[in-house]
Every structure is written in C-alpha cells, then in structure tokens.
Image: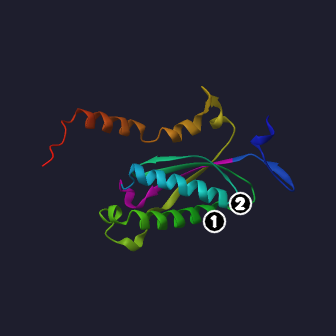
C-alpha cells in the first residue's frame, strides 16, 4: 500500500476513517446550498485544526455527512462536540434571518443533540470507477432532489417583472 494511506506519529502509524452524520434540530429542512458550502469550509478548517483530514462533506437540507481520516490520539467525542459547537455558532451568525424562520427558540442550537459516527474500514472505501464508494455516496447527497428542483424551475415560465 502507498505510504500516504497511513498517518505516521512518533510511536506508530494508523489508517482510521470515520463517517459522521449530524442532523439539524428537529430535523427541519434548514440547510440551503449556500449554507452547505459554508459548512464544507468550516469542516475543512476544523479538520485541519484537529490534525485530521477532511475527505468529503455534503448533505441535504436536514443532515450533514462528514467523512474524515484521523489519528488514534484524537478523541472523537471532543472533536464532534467542537465541530457541532463551532459550526452551529458560525452558521447561526451568518444565516440568522433564514434560520429564524425555522427555529422559534433560538437558544436550542442548530444541530440535534445526537449524532451518528461509524468507523470505516478498508471495504467501504474500495475504489469503484476511480472514486471510493463512501466518498461518492457523500458527494451525491441531495443530488436527486437538486436535479428534480432544477428540472421544475426550468419548466416554469419566466417570472414577470413589474
């Protein structure tokens, strides 16, 4: 295997991957395309600060998928709590007006309290047509809905301007 598949530290090497899924509070469809792009930037920045590698980030209007590689020294629960806190705060500041339409109690946060994290071994990351399976799954989040929305918008007559 190529050496770059492993993270080297002073006492050993590792190849650990995780798939994190976060759901919006009350599973409300709050995330726009612009918000998802902003969350992708936040994810890449936070992964870098936590010395892990962000492989893929995507989602739909009510949930986010994050696929990342990490070292065994990283405490996943602390990383997840930090990710949820930082991303919630930043998203709520930047998209306050949009989010206030959904959240009547602003103090409750943006993410649901629970989350799903799965360790990902060699099998789910096997290459299929040049792209790892799980990376392609995360990349394709929301594509069916987005394509249907685009087709609907294209079929609509132009909006009359007054």
At a point 14% along the width and 43% down the height, the residue shown is 160
The residue at the far top in this view is: 129
Rendering coords of residue 98 (x, y %): 33, 61
The one nearer the camera, 157 or 121, is 157
Can you identify the residue that label 1 sits on? Answer: 78
Q: Distance from label 1 to label 2 (Cα)?
A: 8 Å
Q: Circle 2 is placed at which residue position?
A: 74
Q: Where residue 104 appears, x then y in whole percent?
A: 31, 69
Q: Main secondary structure of the magenta part?
A: strand
Residue found farthest to the front: 162
- How crowded pointer 1 is (Cα within 10 Å; few <14, some 14-19, many 20+) is rated as few
Residue at x-position 26% and y-position 38%: 153
Measuring from the top left, give residue 17's x and y in whole percent.
Answer: 67, 47
On whether residue 22 falls in the magenta region, the answer is yes
Please, what secondary structure does the residue beneath circle 1 have?
helix
Residue closest to the far bottom: 107
Mark 2 Cα within 10 Å, few/some/many (few <14, many 20+)? few
x 46%, y 47%: residue: 59
Judged left or right of residue 77, residue 147 is left
* Above or below 134: residue 44: below
In the image, is 115 to the left or to the right of 147?
right
* Mark sitting on residue 42: none
Question: Magenta residues, as a range?
Answer: 17-29
Left or right: 107 as drawn, with respect to 134 = left
Q: Is residue 83 magenta?
A: no
Q: How is the image coloured?
A: rainbow
Residue depicted at x 52% and y 38%: 137
Residue 126: which quarter of the image?
top right
Q: Do labels 1 and 2 touch, CB within 8 Å?
A: yes
């Amino acid at each position: 295997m190529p050496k770059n598949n492993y993270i080297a530290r002073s006492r050993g090497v590792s190849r650990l991957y995780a798939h994190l899924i976060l759901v919006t509070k009350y599973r409300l469809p709050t995330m726009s395309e612009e918000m998802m792009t902003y969350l992708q930037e936040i994810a890449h920045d936070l992964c870098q600060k936590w010395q892990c590698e962000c492989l893929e980030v995507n989602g739909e209007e009510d949930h986010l998928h994050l696929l990342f590689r990490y070292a065994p020294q990283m405490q996943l629960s602390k990383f997840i709590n930090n990710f949820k806190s930082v991303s919630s705060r930043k998203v709520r500041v930047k998209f306050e007006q949009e989010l206030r339409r959904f959240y009547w109690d602003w103090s409750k946060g943006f993410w649901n309290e629970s989350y799903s994290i799965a360790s990902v071994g060699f099998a789910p990351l096997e290459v299929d047509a040049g792209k790892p399976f799980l990376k392609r799954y995360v990349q394709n989040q929301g594509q069916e809905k987005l394509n249907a929305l685009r087709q609907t918008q294209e079929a609509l007559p132009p909006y009359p301007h007054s």
